[in-house]
Image: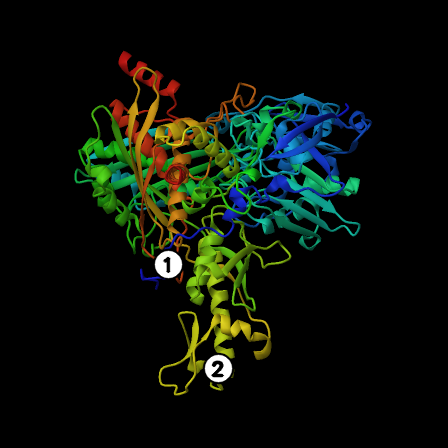
Amino acid sequence: MSKVHVVTSVNGEPREMLCEPQQSLLEVLRDELGMTGTKEGCATGDCGACSVMIDGRLVCSCLMLGVEAQGVDITTIEGIAEGSTLHPVQRKFLEHAALQCGICTPGFIVATKALLDRNPDPDETTIRYWLAGNLCRCTGYDKIIRAVQDAAAELAHEA
Amino acid sequence: MAEARDYRAIGTRPVRPDGVDKVTGRANFGADMNLPNMIHGKVLRSPHAHARIKSIDGSRALEMPGVYAVISGADFPSGAEGEISGEGGGTVSDLAMNIMARDKALYHGHAVAAVAAKTAFLAETALELIDVEYEVLPPVLDVDVAMEPGATLVDENQHTRGNESAGPSNIAAITKFERGDPEAGFAEADVVVEGDYRVPTAHQGYIEPHACTATLDEQGRATVWCCTQGHFDVRSMTAGVLGKSVGEIKVIPSEIGGGFGGKTVIYLEPLAVKLSELTGRPVKMVMSREEVFRATGPTSASHCKIKVGAKRDGTITAATAWMAYEAGAYPGAPVGPGCMSVFAPYDLENFRIEGFDVLVNKPKAAAYRAPGAPQSMHAMESAMDELARRIGMDPIDLRLKNCADEGTQAPYGPVYPPIGIRKCLEAAKVHPNYTTPKAEGTGRGIAAGFWFNIGMQSSAEVRLSEDGTVTVMEGSPDIGGSRASMCLMAAETLGVPYDVVRAHIGDTESTGFCNVTGGSRTTFATGLAVVQACEDIIAECKKRAAATWDIDADQVDWTEGEAIPKPGVNIDVQPLSLADIAGSMGRTGGPILGRASLNAQGAGAGFSVNFADVNVDQETGKVDILSFTAIQDAGTAIHPSYVEGQMQGGAVQGLGWALNEEYIYDDNGVMENAGFLDYRVPVASDMPMIDTQIIEVPNPSHPYGVRGVGETPIVAPLAVTSNAVSDALGFRISDLPLSPPRVLAAIDAHEED
């Protein structure tokens, strides 16, 4: 099987990659580009650990083929901080102890940023339903929800 | 004895040392390891729950370009001997056969062969070209059926331990203990309740699948990178399966994406080492989610019968428990701890407990958070609720009436040191969530939880840098913030700020032996080693200060992070801080480091009381958790946010088990819901906030009063949910999960009666 040449943008930088036709975007990010911050928990779109944004939309990268990334803008966990400054969502996850093992955390942070980008003032129910596609087995979600609420409040204050 | 007191560092809530790496994606987990020239391994798994393996032929797979090796049971030494050290126990022989089947496949998903190929995709494709001839046998799939005389045998050579002359049996072991005269106790009772309770198989559900990468060098020395709760135990288990010595294997732990007991055992590591040996290349193996469900240890399904008798005033006069747990394909269901925990919160004069460890054709059970206790205590705490109803007593008052205290002989033997069950019950009684009446039409349930906690072996080394920063090196994988706890205890002991302390998890060759992060032992036992290693540093710092001042070391005190002359020692000197001493250590005697190694005793039992309000939708049978309150004795909360996190996370795991989670098998023993879509763990929109209240009854066996907190939280929510749903419905559903189909069927059946 010959590989397919794909031109895309990852975290604002143009990237070229060679994908096998059956490789998911998750596999391409991790295995071809060496960006292992995006995690695999299920490879069936059920756990959200592989969440990325494609042109600003939240997507499970395990459910998209690498070859489908031609010409899109991909945002991964590696692109959430601005230079050496953590994004407020990242900082609030730390301050609220909203992670225990940390395997689901990249997916939650990408999903939260996608939420706050489109809805800067979500109520608790909205947050819980938006994040229902991201599984966390450690925290029971309580501290995650509080971190998201606090990040939203801080971003609103900054705006 | 430790008493509650004012601390500088302990009890604060700083950001964890490994936090930034985990919110930026930099932290390396099990599947993130890549090496030059690396190839990929995949496992061929049995399509039958019970089958004799007549032949395995990998020649067609090996002909495929890019396929480097095929292995099966024949490639591993037979007759492995010895017991597995560490938390779970069991034999090396069973472990070896569970990792790679020999003459029989004992469950659907049992590994029968493995392949190494250039890519994971190629390896998976090659699996289809391995030819295995099976003789399919009937499976035995239910604990009650497996116990019947004449049942299909999982293992024709399995005898009940201690009764080897009686012929083979699926019952691998029987646990029994008894105190007083239960029959006389029941005769004295005014009220006797009896019940029959079933809890299904549940999986730990860690989000990170098992993963490892292994190399074997030309001298036969292996290096293994993997996600594990205990790399020293991975080393000994891998050595045991391969017939190697531990000195030939180095294990480097990655970050670990959840374990909950399920990563205290191994599945892939010996296969990866063997494939590396055959190919001369590093081999990476990562499980799929489906493999995790089908082939790694869930916890046992159980059947428990409870009988409790009491006087009208609530005094329990007798109790009996009978419980049978599914071990899966090899002995080792957590029925022993199930028996030991079932009556643990209570002071009972007369009781009898019997437990059965039963083989079935399902994956071998592995530890899952307080292994065995959720099942048996679901039964007992449900029975207590029935008893409270029958005698018209508040369920908290009934538990207070029979509550164990310091000095009570625990049902499992020892006399309790200070414990927190009474304080948890008293706190629940006055908690605003309990004193507020439940809403019309809803149900409220309460239950107690318990876990022993363990000590076991730990080591730690603490090193000073020239600028006074402190490095803690220990060997307990950080699964939920333990680096932060180690840094807090080191900062407290040394009297320095938290942010000058760093904590590192060393590999098997860079730090001393530590048992698994399990049994809620890490903050207690490894924390104890860290505290002792810091005390070692302080002793050396006092010597350096004494030499500088030309006085004896016993004339020096260590206060607030500084060496000062003791009161009455008349010399005119400035105190020397840790940084001062570190800055000059090259001139005062060389590098300063402290070390400690121990086998920790006195872990201190952890008790909890949880309660919840629920709504049951009469049309659909769906149960909604409206509020949940977790109260638990933490001894001393080192980092309260992570203690709360354990309580909240354990509560939601318990609620998932109570509400939805179960392994669903077809008649052939094939799990029908081996994915997160159908094995439904709680998601954010299923849950309310989880209110927590930490009780602190310091553990006298730890300098800061720590007792383990990680496991107790999963225990109570099962019965809390059952009791709340019973309250809402007006009748009891004894079996879990309380999923919509079961609840709806029960409502329909009840209406027909």
How far apart marks 1 and 2 lie (CA) works out to: 31 Å
Q: Quadrant of residue A155?
A: top left
Is residue B685 at least partly visible in the picture?
A: no
Q: Is residue B738 left or right of residue B428?
A: right
Q: Does residue B76 sit above or below B721 in this rendering?
A: below
Residue B358 pos. (x, y %)? 50, 33
Residue B174: horizontal and vertical position, in percent?
47, 39
Residue B723 got which mark?
Answer: none
Tag 1, which secondary structure? loop
Q: Residue at x 82, y 27 (%)?
A: B63
> Looking at the picture, how far across and down is residue B58, in whole percent?
77, 28
Circle 2 packing at 10 Å, graded few (<14), some (14-19), many (20+), is many
Is disc 2 placed on a helix, strand or loop? Answer: helix
User: Which numbered disc, 1 or 2, marks the residue that appears first in the sequence?
Assistant: 2
Which chain is indicated by disc 1? B
Q: Can residue B135 be seen in this snapshot? A: yes
**Mark 1 residue type:** Gly
In the displayed structure, B516 sits above or below B529; it is: above
Q: How is the image coloured?
A: rainbow
Quarter of the figure that contains the N terminus of chain B: bottom left
Residue B578, placed above or below residue B118: below
Quick one: B553 or A51, which is closer to the camera?
Answer: A51
Do the residues marked 1 and 2 share a common chain? yes
Q: Which residue lies under the disc numbered 2?
A: B546
Residue with the mark numbered 1: B705
